[in-house]
Image (cartoon, rainbow, N blue to C red):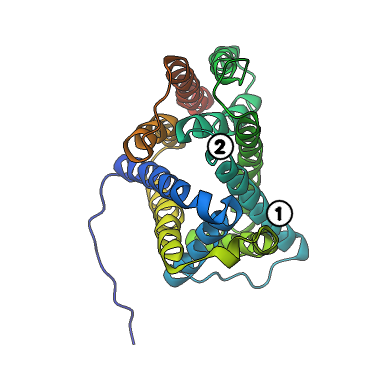
């Protein structure tokens, strides 16, 4: 029987990216509402595990015929993704969403600048450095030092995730993107499950937490992965990077609207500086290669 194909008119790719960003941060905001009840580890498990199920329903992975080294690379990729999310959710348990996303964004910004030898990148590093300094939990700061440390940990693992994703894309070039991500999320789920059991979060699960977890998984995993893969078919990497640099600002806005997280002027300036550095690094990266 032939498969039924739906020819749906999708929005422009730039709109898909913006919706993806908003969806991801909306999911993070919802996740923060249950972290205090079941813990950050179990909240991440729900996002990753239920996200894997959602993507499996859309596309099953075809991963036969690869070498052991290829499979180990995929496992490492899944572990970096799990560590990134675990660190990030631990951070938003302790510090405002917008600040956590801003500090986490140091990861991709660092990768972009490290792969360049242009003098101009020193400017972006300077702006990001000033922003980080303003967010530092110095004396009198209301920021939790552990939350800041976890956000930096998330930044490190996001950088590793980006570097590994480039290798994964080459090794599994013939595998459907959604199918590959479902397999990666399954690796993350298996890694997070024993941690969740040890934390005791699974014993506190109730139907309402599972329902919110499913919402988080759809908003933070299924929708972003689907929309971003579709957008990247038509959108230049440079433009994609610039749009993704709006993530800290969107996270700050949603944190205020949904979680009522109010930030001081110092924090707002810091978020603006880091966002500006990310936009600059992304905007000029591709352009320089084309010259």
Tell me the residue at 37%/47% (across/down).
23
Figure quadrant of residue 42: bottom right
- Left or right of 235: which side holds 97? right
| Residue appearing at x 48%, y 22% in the figure | 284
How far across and down, in percent of the image, does residue 200 sit?
A: 64, 61
Residue bearing mark 2? 94
Residue 122 point in image, percent of width and height? 60, 13
State which tag comes first along the sequence, 2 or 1. 1
Is residue 232 placed above or below 5 in the rendered structure?
above
Residue sticking out furthest to the bottom: 1
Q: Is residue 221 placed above or below 247 in the rendered structure?
A: below
Rendered image: mark on residue 76: 1
Determine whether the residue tagged by mark 1 lies in a helix, strand or loop: helix
Image location (x, y in percent) of residue 6: 26, 68
**Where 65 sits versus 119, above or below?**
below
Q: Nearer the viewer, residue 264 or 105?
A: 264
Q: Residue furthest right?
A: 68
Numbered disc 2: secondary structure: loop
Residue 78 image-quadrant placement? bottom right
Query: Dot 2 surroundings within 10 Å: few (below 14), some, or many (20 or more)?
Result: some
Point out the image quarter for the N terminus.
bottom left
Where on the picture, by quarter, is residue 119? top right
Disc 2/disc 1 C-alpha distance (Å): 27 Å
37 or 21: nearer the viewer: 37
Number of the label disc, if any, that sits on residue 134? none
Residue sitting nearer the eye, 116 or 47: 47
- Residue 148 higher or lower than 55, as above or below: above
2 or 1: mark nearer the eye: 2
């Amino acid at each position: 029987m032939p498969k039924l194909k739906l020819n749906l008119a999708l929005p422009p790719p730039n709109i898909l990216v913006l919706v993806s960003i908003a969806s991801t941060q909306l999911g993070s905001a919802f996740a923060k509402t249950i972290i205090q009840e079941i813990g950050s580890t179990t909240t991440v498990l729900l996002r990753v595990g239920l996200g894997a199920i959602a993507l499996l329903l859309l596309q099953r992975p075809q991963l036969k015929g690869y070498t052991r080294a290829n499979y180990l690379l995929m496992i490492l990729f899944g572990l970096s993704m799990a560590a990134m999310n675990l660190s990030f959710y631990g951070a938003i348990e302790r510090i405002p969403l917008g600040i956590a996303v801003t500090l986490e964004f140091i990861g991709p910004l660092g990768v972009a600048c490290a792969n360049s030898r242009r003098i101009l990148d020193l400017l972006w590093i300077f702006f990001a450095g000033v922003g980080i300094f303003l967010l530092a939990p110095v004396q009198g700061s209301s920021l939790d030092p552990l939350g800041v440390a976890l956000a930096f940990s998330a930044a490190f693992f996001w950088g590793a995730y980006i570097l590994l994703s480039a290798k994964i894309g080459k090794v599994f070039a013939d595998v459907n993107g959604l199918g590959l991500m479902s397999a990666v999320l399954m690796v993350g789920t298996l890694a997070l499950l024993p941690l969740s059991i040890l934390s005791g979060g699974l014993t506190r699960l109730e139907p309402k937490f599972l329902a919110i977890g499913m919402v988080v998984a759809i908003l933070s995993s299924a929708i972003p992965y689907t929309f971003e893969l579709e957008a990247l078919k038509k959108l230049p990497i440079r433009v994609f990077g610039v749009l993704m640099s709006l993530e800290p600002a969107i996270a700050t806005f949603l944190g205020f609207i949904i979680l009522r997280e109010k930030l001081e002027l110092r924090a707002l300036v810091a978020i603006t500086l880091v966002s500006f550095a990310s936009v600059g690094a992304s905007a000029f990266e591709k352009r320089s290669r084309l010259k």
